[in-house]
Protein backbone atom coordinates (compact mmCIF):
# COMPACT_ATOMS: atom_id res chain seq x y z
CA UNK A 1 0.00 0.00 0.00
CA UNK A 2 2.97 2.33 0.48
CA UNK A 3 3.44 2.43 -3.30
CA UNK A 4 -0.02 3.95 -3.80
CA UNK A 5 -0.46 7.30 -5.44
CA UNK A 6 -0.65 10.18 -2.98
CA UNK A 7 -4.14 11.06 -4.19
CA UNK A 8 -5.35 7.55 -3.39
CA UNK A 9 -3.92 7.74 0.13
CA UNK A 10 -5.54 11.16 0.61
CA UNK A 11 -8.91 9.75 -0.50
CA UNK A 12 -8.48 6.77 1.81
CA UNK A 13 -7.83 9.10 4.73
CA UNK A 14 -10.82 11.32 3.93
CA UNK A 15 -13.23 8.47 3.26
CA UNK A 16 -12.07 6.58 6.34
CA UNK A 17 -13.16 9.62 8.37
CA UNK A 18 -16.58 9.47 6.72
CA UNK A 19 -16.78 5.75 7.45
CA UNK A 20 -15.90 6.29 11.10
CA UNK A 21 -18.50 9.06 11.40
CA UNK A 22 -21.15 6.80 9.85
CA UNK A 23 -20.41 3.58 11.72
CA UNK A 24 -18.66 4.75 14.89
CA UNK A 25 -15.48 2.73 14.41
CA UNK A 26 -12.48 2.62 12.13
CA UNK A 27 -12.63 0.79 8.81
CA UNK A 28 -11.33 -2.76 9.26
CA UNK A 29 -10.14 -4.87 6.37
CA UNK A 30 -7.72 -7.74 6.06
CA UNK A 31 -5.42 -5.74 3.81
CA UNK A 32 -2.66 -8.28 3.18
CA UNK A 33 -2.06 -8.50 -0.54
CA UNK A 34 -4.49 -5.69 -1.39
CA UNK A 35 -3.56 -2.47 -3.14
CA UNK A 36 -4.62 0.92 -1.81
CA UNK A 37 -7.05 1.15 -4.73
CA UNK A 38 -8.64 -2.19 -3.77
CA UNK A 39 -8.96 -1.07 -0.15
CA UNK A 40 -10.53 2.23 -1.22
CA UNK A 41 -12.99 0.37 -3.45
CA UNK A 42 -13.95 -1.93 -0.56
CA UNK A 43 -14.39 1.04 1.77
CA UNK A 44 -16.67 2.76 -0.74
CA UNK A 45 -18.70 -0.38 -1.30
CA UNK A 46 -19.11 -1.00 2.42
CA UNK A 47 -20.29 2.58 3.00
CA UNK A 48 -23.56 1.48 1.40
CA UNK A 49 -24.13 -1.15 4.12
CA UNK A 50 -26.61 -0.57 6.87
CA UNK A 51 -25.01 -0.49 10.36
CA UNK A 52 -25.97 -4.08 11.27
CA UNK A 53 -24.62 -5.51 8.02
CA UNK A 54 -21.44 -3.50 8.36
CA UNK A 55 -20.96 -4.68 11.94
CA UNK A 56 -21.05 -8.28 10.67
CA UNK A 57 -18.66 -7.52 7.80
CA UNK A 58 -16.24 -5.67 10.09
CA UNK A 59 -16.33 -8.56 12.59
CA UNK A 60 -15.47 -11.03 9.83
CA UNK A 61 -12.60 -8.82 8.68
CA UNK A 62 -11.38 -8.65 12.28
CA UNK A 63 -11.45 -12.47 12.45
CA UNK A 64 -9.41 -12.66 9.22
CA UNK A 65 -6.82 -10.25 10.62
CA UNK A 66 -6.56 -12.20 13.89
CA UNK A 67 -6.26 -15.50 12.01
CA UNK A 68 -3.45 -14.15 9.82
CA UNK A 69 -1.60 -12.86 12.86
CA UNK A 70 -1.98 -16.15 14.71
CA UNK A 71 -0.87 -18.14 11.69
CA UNK A 72 2.26 -15.99 11.64
CA UNK A 73 3.07 -17.13 15.18
CA UNK A 74 2.70 -20.84 14.50
CA UNK A 75 5.57 -22.44 12.59
CA UNK A 76 4.58 -24.50 9.56
CA UNK A 77 5.18 -28.25 9.86
CA UNK A 78 8.22 -29.47 7.99
CA UNK A 79 7.77 -31.84 5.11
CA UNK A 80 7.60 -35.41 6.27
CA UNK A 81 6.49 -34.39 9.77
CA UNK A 82 3.01 -34.39 11.26
Image (cartoon, helix red, strand yellow):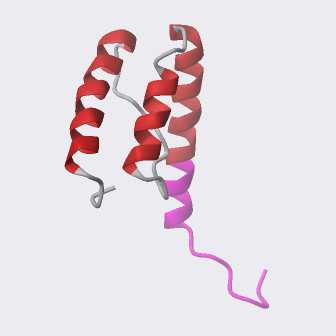
In percent of the image, x 57 and y 26: which residue is there? 57
**Along the viewing direction, whichever of 17 and 64 lies nearer the viewer:** 17
In the displayed structure, would residue 22 be above or below residue 77?
above
At a point 56% along the width and 68% down the height, the residue shown is 74
Q: Image quadrant for the N terminus?
A: bottom left
Query: Is residue 26 shown left or right of residue 41?
Result: left
Residue situated in front as seen by the camera: 15 or 27:
15
Q: Give the quarter of the image for residue 79.
A: bottom right
Residue 35, x across and y down, in percent: 42, 53
Q: Residue at x 29, y 61 (%)?
A: 3
Q: Identify the image quadrant of the C terminus.
A: bottom right
Q: Give the image location of residue 14, x and y in percent.
A: 23, 27
Residue 29 is covered by the magenta coloring: no
Magenta highlight range: 66-82
Q: Is 2 situated above or below 37?
A: below
Q: Residue at x 56, y 61 (%)?
A: 71
Residue, far bottom: 80
Compared with residue 4, is residue 9 higher up or lower down, i.e. above or below?
Answer: above
Looking at the image, is 47 positioned above or below residue 82? above
State the image coordinates of residue 20 (x, y, percent, origin top left).
32, 19
State the image coordinates of residue 72 (x, y, percent, origin top left): 50, 65
The one of 44 and 73 positioned closer to us in this rendering = 44
- Based on the picture, tell me whether residue 69 belongs to the magenta stretch: yes
Count of numbered marks: 0
Amino acid sequence: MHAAAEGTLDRLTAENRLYEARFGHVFLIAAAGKSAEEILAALRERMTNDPMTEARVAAEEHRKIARLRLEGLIPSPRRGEG
